[in-house]
Each structure stands twice: as C-alpha cells, then as structure tokens.
C-alpha cells in the first residue's frame, strides 16, 4: 500500500478503487460475521472458491468470492448474495454450492428452495432488499456491511470512505466540525443519549495540549451485538469517525476499548488500523497536513462495569475497573488526568455520515429530540432474529411484527426488554409507543446500547427480574454500599419469591429499596439496577402476587413452584422421555401411559423438550 | 508445578513491559497456559514494575481470568438474556448435573471446565455453547451427550447442523 501525501492522491486512489470495484461487480458475497461463521459459513466460501475454480475449466465465469461482515439477518445464516443480480440465498450449506454455481452463476436461474419467504404471503423473495426483514429498515450505519470486504481498505475508499475526514481536514476548522455535529443533534448511542456535539465542545475547550478520544466498544449489554457487527463489517468508518473527532477536539491519540469475547472484531480492527497507517490516514502528517493521530486497541477482560466510562478509563490505564464519582467528567479529567472524549461505536460511526451528507440531511431522520437511526438487535423469542436499523420514532409493534415477523412457535407475546440490566420490560399495551430516548425512559426502561429481547408467555417476569439482579449483583464492583448491599438484598427477596417463600409486603419492600438504590448509588450501574424489578412490578404485578399468595408460577418456570406431569390423552408410551430422564423419575412400559415421580423429578424440563406429542404438561 | 518463564518473558516483551498493556498481557498469558500461574503473575509484576498486589487485583477483578488450572476442554455456555429466555439456564443446569461440577469448576478427570458468559453476540443461534472455540447453536439438553462424547473420544470435529 502506498502512502497518500495529499488530498488529491486520496481522490485519485478513490477513482481507481471505484473502477476496480465496478469491474469486479460479479461476485458471490458470503457473510463472514460471527453468527454466520458459527453456522459454518467459512466452509461455504471455501466451497465456492473451489467449485468456481473447478467449473471455470469449462466456462469462463469471472465471479469472485467476497467475504463480508454481518448482514444482520442472523436467523437465516449462512447468507449468500449473488451480485450484481442481488439474488439472496439463506441457510446455504456446502452441499448447495455446486448447484448454485452451475444453475445460478452459469445458468442464471434462481434456486427457489434457498430463497427467503415472506411470512405474511408465504411467497419466495428473490432480492435481499425485498425481504420484509430488510424492507422496513433504513440502513445508514449498516449500509456497507454485506457490500464490502472489511479486510480491504480500498473497498471502503471506493464507496467514498475517508472523504468526510479529508473534507474536515481540508475545508473545516475544528469548531466548524463541532458545529455540524451539534446541528445534527446526534445523541450518544451508548445508552444515556447525551448530545455528542456538546460533549465534544466541552472537551475541545479544556486547556492543555494532550487530549484523548476513546471508543467504547465494550458492549456489555447481553443480547446486543451491533457494535461488534459494525466493527467486523466496516471498521474503517469507525476509524474515520475517531479521526474526525480527534481533529475537532484537538487530540492526537485515541483508544478503542473492545471486549476480548469478540476475537474476530479485534482482529478486523487491528488489521484496519494497520492499513490506515500504511496509507497515511493515521499517523504523522496525515494527508500532508500538520495533523497527527495514532489509534490503539485495548482489550477488556469480561467486566460489565468497564462499559461505564470512568471504569473504562481505569481499565485502559491497566488498573481494576472501578467507577469514579463524576464530576470531574472525562471531558475535563479523563485518561491519565487529561481531557478525554468517550463515545460509543455507533456514535463515532455516525460522524463520517454527518460530515459528508451534512447535518441537515442526518437530522431529517428521526423525531424532534432523537435524530438519525438506531440499531437494535432483535433477539429472544422472535421469528427473525437479527440486527435492525430504523429511524428513531418507529413503533415497537412495527419492530416486533413487521420486521421481526412475530413471536416464534406461534406463542403469545408477553414483553419486550430494552436497556439490558439497566432497562425494563415493556408490556403489550405499550407496543404502539414510538421509539426514542424519552419515551423509553418514561415507561421505565431505557434505550441502552440496543438489545431488544422479546419474551413470550413462557417467560416468568419474576424470574427475569431475578436474572438481571443476579447479573448486577455479580457485576457490581462493590465500591458503594447502595449497590453492593442494596442489590444483594433485593436479590434475596426475589429469590425467596421464586422459591414460593414470598411474604405479604415483599413487593412494597422491593419498591422502596429500588427507589433508595436509584438515589444512592455511585454510578449508573447501581442507579439503574432496580429498573428490571420496578418495571416488572409496574406492568406484571399479578405475576408477583401469584408467586407470593398462591405459590404459583403462571409461566411455568420457577422450579420450586411447578410440577411436571404426563397428559394422559396425549401420551402414546414411546418411552422417549423416560430414556432421557437423568433422574430416572419417569416410569412406563412401551405403549403404556408413563408417569413422573414428583419426588425424584429435578424439574429440568428435558422430558418436555424431547416429547414429540406435547404430552408433558407443567403446572 | 513449574512453568516456562521464558514463554512469559516473550509475552511481556511483546507488550514492551508496558503497564497500559497489563490486561492484554495477562490475556495472552492465559491463552498460553489456560490459566494464570502464580509464577507468571510474579514475573509480570517484576518486569512491568507494578506491585504484585496490583497484578493480583487485576487478575481477580476481570472475569476472563482464572487463577486455577483449567481442564483440557473449556465449555462456555451463554447465559446472556437472549439465550436465557430460550433455555440457557436449563442447559447450564443439565451440564452441571451431567458433569457433576458447578459453573467455574473443573471435572475430576480434568477433562472439562464449565463456565458461563454473558452474550457471545450470536443470539440468533441461542442457546449457544462454545467448546474450545467451536460454536454449538440451538443447543438443547438432549444434544449435550452427543457433543460431550465427541470430546471424550478425542475427536474434536465441528458439528455442522
Ligand atoms: C454499567 C454501565 C455499562 C455501560 N456499558 C456501556 C457499553 O457497553 N457501551 C457503551 O457504549 N456505553 C456503555 N455505558 C455508557 C458509558 O458510560 C458512556 O455513557 C458512553 O460510552 C458514552 O458514549 P455515547 O455518548 O456515545 O453514548 C455504560 C454505562 C454504565 C453505567
Ligand atoms: S445472549 Fe447468548 S449469544 Fe447473545
């Protein structure tokens, strides 16, 4: 890779790269995101390479195989798109490859069996953009995932990459960049929604020569994985955003703090940084200007609290990740005591779009107070699991039913959980709520970093509240009493309730304690920890009362409160359950009705899982 | 139990004995030995020039680190929210029962260590279990035997269904 010394050289390179891309427009793109890899996509692209080479012997094919980042429709992986025709194949296996090459690449025919279907009409959909899951999305940040090979910088450059950075460096002062970010009304995508431009301005205005920019890619919110997908699919846009920010704020060094559980994202990012350095887009005298900027990658090691900005900085400094009271804010005193600007991956990645398209264009999307798009990972008991990017302001119902395709296995919707362990559960009656920061806060949840977990009738809301408190209890750094002791106490009460030992007054006690912790904890981890409990009490109080007063778990989850039994009319005596029971609690001869010995039953639910006749009930 | 301190030194040198790289450095050591041996931690403290109490604090604080030796195969079960609502807890329970260890523990024959993690970012495959880097999606309690026996018999082949 040659070093670029002027803006003109970048433009020249872009023209060449775009021409090369146009020439190679015939390609088979295979998704190489973590999800599709787990489904075996690596073998699929290897098979394509081998098969194309083999069939090339007879016909000239000119197809390239390109491995891209996550397309988002993880439910149906491994995903393959044949370009330029845009034919979209799902669940592609190695054995399908020879036929795809001979029928589609050579013969130009579409293989119906591999197409996605529209769940509403049951019809096959040929093109990726027509699939209902994608049709209702506005993909601003995710647009290049699936288009480009993230390991090649020229692919990003061909599509306009680093143009915003060059524009800022050549034509705009730091203040002007910040003015654009402010005008776009971009709000932090890491959860709290603080206006990004305002934060940058504070940091810029601090005295001192040494300043830092930091990207928070800790993504600790379980069920959220869009930050990882953005880094895996388009790392250069993040790097470009950080470089623009560093220029505007006056920083020369930056860090990306990323969790080690994301090995592929780490590798992709490290490679991208190396390429940007070689091209002179990072390092000293970037594009021939006086601007210098170096970017480092720092790994997290599995502590949720390190997503909190002050704890994150402690961790970058190589210390234990305990939060510090704010103020002083990182913008004033951050890494090694220097002014530091921290933003989330999505916030940074939005910057090149704002600078190149202009703030007005960006602000056209979204609602009055929440602009642009947001990415959710729609997961849990939903038909179309995957990453969904929508303008702020769409309704939750639209997310679950139009994009998500409804609840899996025909079950009944119960709640939507957003905001991770800091968020809450939203009931059916609020599904028409337009999605934005304020609305989610008002109903007792929060935007969080983007996990949206769908729960159905088989999810117990008391168990879920306890699940989240187990999480925060474990992740609490223990520094402040409100969080350390308060969360533990609330957890103990929930534990009792789920074991059928709840008492009159427990619900009220939980409410009082929750309010006290919200007031008294040191950092947002503690202050928001009661949210899952308070929101489930608010909307699902009857489930709590059923546990306490009737010793019943209506969803059939809490082990101490349920019994498994065989439904006599449905059991055909196939012995499958008895053979799979590790406790030998099920007896019955072949073709005879089986019986569960409640005293021996461990309530693991395996019998229910294996029964092909729905003959195991729970009450 | 002696370990090759030279290997530790190589890792320390790779990170220029920089305190800022302490976490990455410990992650690399763990990759090498599957846990953090005491001698290695002492060596790090020595060469990086931080008090050993700080190295221990860091090693204990972050959940990725283990101060105890691990089994030959690492079973990581996701208990993130998406996997939880799809039965992740049941999976952990069942594994605990089958292997007779609690999460965080190693079986007596030193073959398996069971651990849990909060979200691996492939929630579409939930509930997910990872064995030494190989993903097993849509896991159920009934698939456990099949997966474990592969590792018991020493043939670590990927499951492709
Ligand atoms: C316990 C806790 C965990 C957090 N985890 C994350 C995280 O994983 N990713 C993130 O971007 N922000 C996280 N935050 C928010 C950060 O503290 C910070 O507000 C954010 O990185 C600022 O970036 P933004 O303005 O772009 O949102 C967390 C906050 C708390 C209190
Ligand atoms: S919750 Fe298990 S992979 Fe995300």
Image (spheres, rainbow, N blue to C red):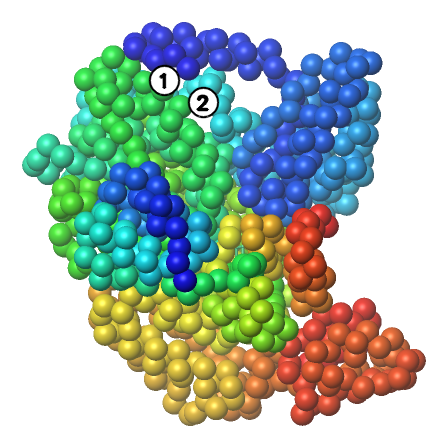
Relative to A483, A449 lies left or right = right
Label 2 resides on the chain identified as A
Q: Is residue A51 left or right of residue A10?
A: right
Q: Quadrant of residue A351?
A: top left
Per the model, the C-alpha gap separating discs 2 and 1 is 9 Å
Secondary-structure class at tag 1: loop
Of A83 and B130, nearer the camera is B130
Residue located 13% across and 46% down the image: A337
Q: Is residue A451 visible?
A: no
Q: How many marks?
A: 2
Residue extending furthest left? A207
Percent across and percent down for residue A534 are: 39, 72
Query: Is residue A352 left or right of B144 when viewed as pictured?
Result: left
Q: Where residue A153 is drawn, which disc sits there? A: 2
Q: Residue furthest right?
A: A591
Quadrant of the rendering where the C terminus of chain A is positioned: bottom right
Classify 10 Å Cα crowding around label 1: few (below 14), some (14-19), many (20 and above): some
Q: Which residue is mark 1?
A: A279
Is A150 positioned to the left or the right of A255 in the image? right
Quick check: marks 2 and 1 in contact, CB under 8 Å? Answer: yes
In the rendered image of this protein, does residue A442 appear above or below residue A555? above
Foreground of the two, A282 or A448: A282
Element class at badge 2 = helix
């Amino acid at each position: 890779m040659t070093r670029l010394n002027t803006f003109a050289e970048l433009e020249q390179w872009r023209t060449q790269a775009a021409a090369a891309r146009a020439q190679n427009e015939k390609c088979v793109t295979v998704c190489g995101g973590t999800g599709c890899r787990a489904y075996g996509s690596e073998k699929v692209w290897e098979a394509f390479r081998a098969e194309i080479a083999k069939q090339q012997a007879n016909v000239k094919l000119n197809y390239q195989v390109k491995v891209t980042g996550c397309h988002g429709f993880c439910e149906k992986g491994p995903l393959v798109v044949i370009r330029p025709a845009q034919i979209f194949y799902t669940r592609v296996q190695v054995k399908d490859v020879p036929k795809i090459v001979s029928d589609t690449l050579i013969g130009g025919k579409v293989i119906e069996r591999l197409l996605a279907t529209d769940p509403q009409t049951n019809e096959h959909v040929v093109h990726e953009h027509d699939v209902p899951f994608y049709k209702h999305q506005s993909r601003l940040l995710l647009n290049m995932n699936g288009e480009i090979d993230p390991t090649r910088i020229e692919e990003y450059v061909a599509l306009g990459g680093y143009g915003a950075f060059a524009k800022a460096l050549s034509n705009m002062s730091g203040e002007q960049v910040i003015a654009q970010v402010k005008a776009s009304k971009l709000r932090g995508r890491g959860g709290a929604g603080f206006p990004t431009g305002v934060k940058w301005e504070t940091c810029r205005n601090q005295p001192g020569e040494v300043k830092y920019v930091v990207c928070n890619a800790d993504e600790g919110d379980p069920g959220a994985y869009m930050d990882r997908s953005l880094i895996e699919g388009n790392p250069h846009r993040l790097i470009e955003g950080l470089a623009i920010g560093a220029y505007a704020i006056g920083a020369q060094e930056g860090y990306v703090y990323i969790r080690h559980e994301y090995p592929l994202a780490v590798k992709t990012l490290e490679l991208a940084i190396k390429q940007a350095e070689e091209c002179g887009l990072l390092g000293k005298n970037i594009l021939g200007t006086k601007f210098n900027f170096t970017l480092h990658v720092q790994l997290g090691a599995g502590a949720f609290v390190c997503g909190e900005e002050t704890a994150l900085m402690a961790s970058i400094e190589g210390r234990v990740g305990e939060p510090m009271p704010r103020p002083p804010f990182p913008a004033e005193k951050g890494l090694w005591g220097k002014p530091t600007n921290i933003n989330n991956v999505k916030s940074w990645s939005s910057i090149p779009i704002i600078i190149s398209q202009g703030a007005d264009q960006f602000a056209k999307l979204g609602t009055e107070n929440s602009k642009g798009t947001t990415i959710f990972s729609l997961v849990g008991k939903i038909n179309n699991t995957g990453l969904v990017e929508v303008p702020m302001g769409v309704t939750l119902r639209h997310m679950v039913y139009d994009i998500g395709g409804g609840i899996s296995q025909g079950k009944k919707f119960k709640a939507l959980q957003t905001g991770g362990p800091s968020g809450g559960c939203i009931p059916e009656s609020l599904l028409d709520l337009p999605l934005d920061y304020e609305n989610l806060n008002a109903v007792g949840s929060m935007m969080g970093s983007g996990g949206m977990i769908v729960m159905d009738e088989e999810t117990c809301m008391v168990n879920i509240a306890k699940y989240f408190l187990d999480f925060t209890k474990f992740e609490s750094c223990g520094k402040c009493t409100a969080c350390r002791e308060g969360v533990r106490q609330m957890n103990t009460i929930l534990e009792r309730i789920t074991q059928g030992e709840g008492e009159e007054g427990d619900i009220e006690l939980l409410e009082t304690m929750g309010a006290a912790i919200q007031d008294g904890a040191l950092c947002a981890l503690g202050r928001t920890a009661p949210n899952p409990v308070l929101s489930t009490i608010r909307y699902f109080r009857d489930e709590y009362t059923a546990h306490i007063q009737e010793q019943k778990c209506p969803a059939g989850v809490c082990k101490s409160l349920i019994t498994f039994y065989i439904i006599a009319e449905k059991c055909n005596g196939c012995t499958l359950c008895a053979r799979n029971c590790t406790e030998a609690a099920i007896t019955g001869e072949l073709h005879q009705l089986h019986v569960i010995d409640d005293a021996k039953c461990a309530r693991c639910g395996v019998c229910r899982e294996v029964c092909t006749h729905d003959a195991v009930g729970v009450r | 139990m002696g370990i090759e301190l030279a290997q530790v030194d190589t890792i320390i040198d790779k990170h220029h004995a920089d305190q800022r790289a302490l976490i990455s450095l410990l992650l690399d050591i763990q990759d090498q030995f599957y846990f953090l041996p005491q001698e290695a931690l002492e060596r790090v403290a020595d060469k990086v020039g931080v008090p050993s109490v700080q190295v221990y604090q860091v090693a204990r604080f972050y959940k990725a680190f283990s101060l105890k030796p691990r089994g030959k195969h690492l079973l990581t079960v996701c208990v993130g929210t998406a996997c939880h609502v799809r039965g992740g807890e049941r999976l952990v329970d069942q594994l605990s029962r089958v292997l007779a260890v609690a999460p965080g523990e190693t079986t007596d024959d030193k073959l398996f260590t069971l651990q849990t993690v909060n979200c691996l970012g492939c929630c579409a495959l939930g509930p997910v279990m990872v064995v030494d880097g190989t993903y097993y999606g849509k896991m159920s309690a009934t698939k456990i035997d099949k997966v474990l026996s592969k590792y018991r018999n020493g043939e670590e082949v990927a499951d492709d269904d």
